[in-house]
Amino acid sequence: MTRTARELLETTTGKLAPDPQANRLLPLIGRGAARRDTLATLALEQRYVIAADRRAFLHLAERSAAEPECSAFFTMLAEGEALAHDRLGPLLDACGADEARVAAYEPLAGAQAYPAYVAWLALNGAPADVVLALSANFSAWGGYCATIAEALRRQYGFDDEACGFFDLFAEPAPDLEQKAVAAVQAGLDAKSISEEAVHRYGRLLQRYEEMFWHTLWELDRGEA
């Protein structure tokens, strides 16, 4: 039986779902036990992640010019990263990170492994395979953001503007989903998708995502 693009996206997301216990920082934030300085570091690290991912997505859009459905997906991702960058300012302010700290901040290697791998995918991954792997990873990221946005309001007293960064990723993105379906369907039609590669990419993305959160968890515990 021939699978549709939507079915492949759903099964891939299910297979690549993270261990619910892997993100140790999330429950700390959820109950208000994470230090505000850790929240500031989270926002500061995201400045680097967002900038790097945006450039990677733009490169993928350019690389996949001959595959317009994939190019449209990556272009929308890049546009979303630009919007996310604009929402980081209020979050940094709410966390108490002033301009001097932002300018002097040195990113953590464990937190930047994820965007480094996205950059690798931008150079080496087949576009439709990357669409699938990223889409599966985004599902977990969106859930994390929804939890954090709620906790920042309830436990830390952040206002809507300060939570805007996490709200952006927590909200459903039907237009992006439609573009992902179109890109994957084009890949299926062209028989250009390698599920073996997709699963390898997705597993590594998820592992690097876990490293991001674990690095911040260690920092919160004073172990980094």
Image: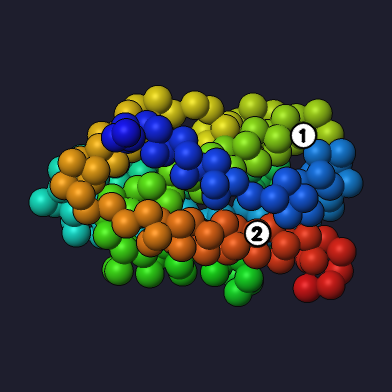
Q: Quadrant of residue 217?
A: bottom right
Q: Is residue 36 shown above or below 208?
A: above
Q: Can residue 138 be seen in this view?
A: no
**How many badges with numbers are in the image?**
2
Q: How crowded is the residue under tag 1: few (<14 C-alpha within 10 Å), some, or many (20+)?
A: many
Report whether 215 appears left or right of 85.
right
Which residue: 42% across, 51% down? 133
Q: Is residue 218 shown above or below 95?
A: below
Q: Residue 210 carries which label?
A: 2
Which residue: 57% across, 32% down? 170
Say which amino acid is labelled 1. Ala
- Between 217 and 160, the one lying in front of the other is 217
Q: Is residue 47 visible?
A: yes
Q: Where is residue 157 in the image (x, y as percent from the top left)?
A: 79, 32
Q: Which mark is residue 151?
A: 1
Report whether 153 appears left or right of 85.
right
Q: Which mark is residue 162?
A: none
